[in-house]
Image (spheres, helix red, strand yellow):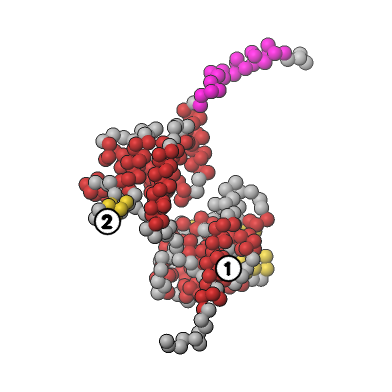
Amino acid sequence: MRKSNAGDIVKIVDAAHLPAPLDPATLHADAREAAQALVREGDSANTHQSYQSAMRYWMGWYRLRYGAPLIPPLSPAAIVQFVVDHAQRQGKQGLTTEMPEALDAALVAQGLKARTGPPALATLLHRMSVIAKLHTSRDLPNPCAEPAVRELLAKTRRAYAKRGVKTAKKDALTREPLRALLATCDDSLRGKRDRALLLFAWASGGRRRSEVVRATCENVRRSGPEHYVYTLGWSKTNQQGADLPENEKPIAGAAAAALTDWLAASGIESGPIFRRVRRGGHVGEALSEAAVRDIVRERCALAGLDGDFSAHSLRAGFVTEAALQQVPLAETMSMTGHTSVATVVGYFRRADMQRSRASDLMGSDDGAKA
């Protein structure tokens, strides 16, 4: 066999009709689009939807405010204008913004907001983070990083805090409120499903909506008569899908019994566990994340609970209940999958305050009148 040499290799390469060499200092438009597609695919559905919603709002506001389409990079002046149009400040006649009434009404008419008036501070800050991400993802100068903009945002947060505005948090579904929800679940197929879903999400560590709808007969295996293990392959805090010991979430007791009951009644043997129940008791396709939220809210309404509840209330309720029952912090975090100790400690501190002996130093019997 004749030995190949460099000249032969060049001829072979030439014959392959390779594309023209790329400039290593410049990213081709197709490659940039492919990279952005990978980033979008790596984001969760909720993240992608919230990003798209924020960008639609930005584009609508910009066109109405400046009479031109939004083309990055934006100027720091445009960013400041956005902030003062949406952030409330103390005026002579109370709280006000720089948003013209006609522009505000036009945003509502275009379906970019539900009602007139300023957004919540969290919404404003989210929209600011989205416009900053737009610039950094395209390797453009980020106007949100300008000192004047950063100072404005910091002082805006402080002004809201001084007025007593707090970040809205969903009410927690601890053990007793959860029992009230379970009491609304009858023996119908839908009732069995909802009971299994509520207990599964709560007892397995306060699972997120995305984690509930990803539960399948393949990643939830029976490990005993009344015991299952949910192998959580991907989550918000494990977006690389790393194989970790804490991915194994136990499901035992009432949660396991409810899951067994639902699987037997529905006849589900493969694929998604939690599915739509159509009229006539027909089991359909997998539930969406929005459907999980709606189930929680519907059961809260049926139970007559007062408060602001959502699917996240199950997660908040599990952590709060663990704190109330003095489950060790590390054990709680291994179940929930939290990576931020500070977040979980916040729940534990609130639970500690509920048990505080300092709240009743007078004693219940010392109510003597002066």
Residue 172 appears left or right of 245: left
Dot 1 alpha-carbon crowd within 10 angstroms: few under 14, some 14 to 19, many 20 or more: many
Range of the magenta residues?
Answer: 5-27
| Residue to which mark 2 is pinned | 94
Residue 208 in view of the camera: yes
Task: Using the image, determine if residue 146 lies above or below residue 118.
Answer: above
Residue 70 falls within the magenta-colored stretch = no
The extreme right residue here reads: 1
Query: In the image, residue 155 lies at what x, y percent?
Result: 40, 48
Residue 329 position in % (x across, y down): 62, 63
Nearest to N terminus: mark 1 or mark 2? 2
The amino acid at mark 2 is Gly
Check if residue 26 falls in the magenta segment.
Answer: yes
Horizontal side of residue 148 vs 363, given as left or right = left
In the current view of this chain or complex, which residue is farthest to the top? 7
Residue 239: percent from the left, percent from the top?
57, 48
At horizontal 34% and vertical 52% (from top left) the residue drawn is 119
